[in-house]
Image (tube, rainbow, N blue to C red):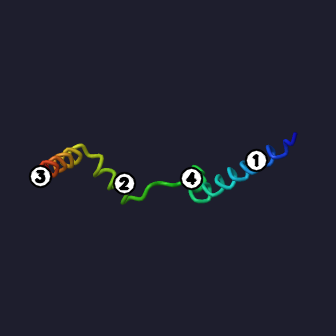
């Protein structure tokens, strides 16, 4: 009985998993907890989009567009 192929399979799968892990870490980066504050421009955009009145207006506009389509 030749069980050496099972060990080779395990080693190959571990190498592939390690390669994928390292590629994802390189692309996505490593979270350090020191990302810093958001820019002031982003804060303004967030405030505009979180405003309930703005949300209601957006929904009304979408409803009007949907009615025009149908």
Please state which of the two labelled residues, at mark 3 or mark 1, is closer to the viewer.
1
Please state which of the two labelled residues, at mark 2 or mark 1, is closer to the viewer.
1
Residue pointed to by mark 1: 9
Evaluate if marks 2 and 1 touch, with contact meaning CB atoms under 8 Å apart.
no
Please state which of the two labelled residues, at mark 2 or mark 3, is closer to the viewer.
3
Please state which of the two labelled residues, at mark 4 or mark 3, is closer to the viewer.
3
- The Cα–Cα distance between marks 3 and 1, rounded to whole angstroms, is 59 Å
Evaluate if marks 4 and 2 touch, with contact meaning CB atoms under 8 Å apart.
no
Q: Does label 2 or label 1 sit earlier along the sequence? A: 1
Residue pointed to by mark 3: 68
- The Cα–Cα distance between marks 2 and 1, rounded to whole angstroms, is 51 Å
Question: Residue at 42% of width from left, 59% of height from top?
Answer: 39
Point out residue 63 in the picture as x, y percentages from the top left corner: 16, 46
Q: Callout 3: helix, strand or loop?
A: helix
- The Cα–Cα distance between marks 2 and 3, rounded to whole angstroms, is 34 Å
Residue pointed to by mark 4: 34
Point out residue 36 in the picture as x, y percentages from the top left corner: 51, 55
Question: Residue at 70% of width from left, 52% of height from top?
Answer: 18
Please state which of the two labelled residues, at mark 1 or mark 4, is closer to the viewer.
1
Point out residue 67 in the picture as x, y percentages from the top left corner: 12, 48
Q: Does label 4 or label 3 sit earlier along the sequence? A: 4
Task: Give the left or right position of residue 58, taking residue 68 as reference.
Answer: right
Q: Does label 3 or label 1 sit earlier along the sequence? A: 1
Tell me if mark 4 has few (under 14), some (14-19) or many (20+) residues whose alpha carbon lies within 10 angstroms of its own.
few
Q: Please state which of residues 52 and 27 is positioned toward the viewer in this rendering.
A: 27
Residue pointed to by mark 2: 43
Tag shown at residue 44: none
Q: Callout 4: helix, strand or loop?
A: loop
Position of the N terminus, as image quadrant, is top right
Looking at the image, the residue that sits furthest to the right is 1
Looking at the image, the residue that sits furthest to the front is 1
């Amino acid at each position: 009985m030749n069980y050496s192929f099972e060990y080779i399979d395990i080693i190959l799968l571990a190498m592939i998993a390690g390669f994928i892990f390292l590629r994802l870490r390189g692309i996505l980066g490593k979270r350090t907890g020191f990302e810093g504050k958001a820019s002031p421009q982003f804060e303004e955009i967030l405030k505009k989009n979180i405003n309930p009145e703005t949300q209601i207006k957006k929904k009304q506009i979408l409803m009007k567009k949907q009615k025009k389509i149908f």
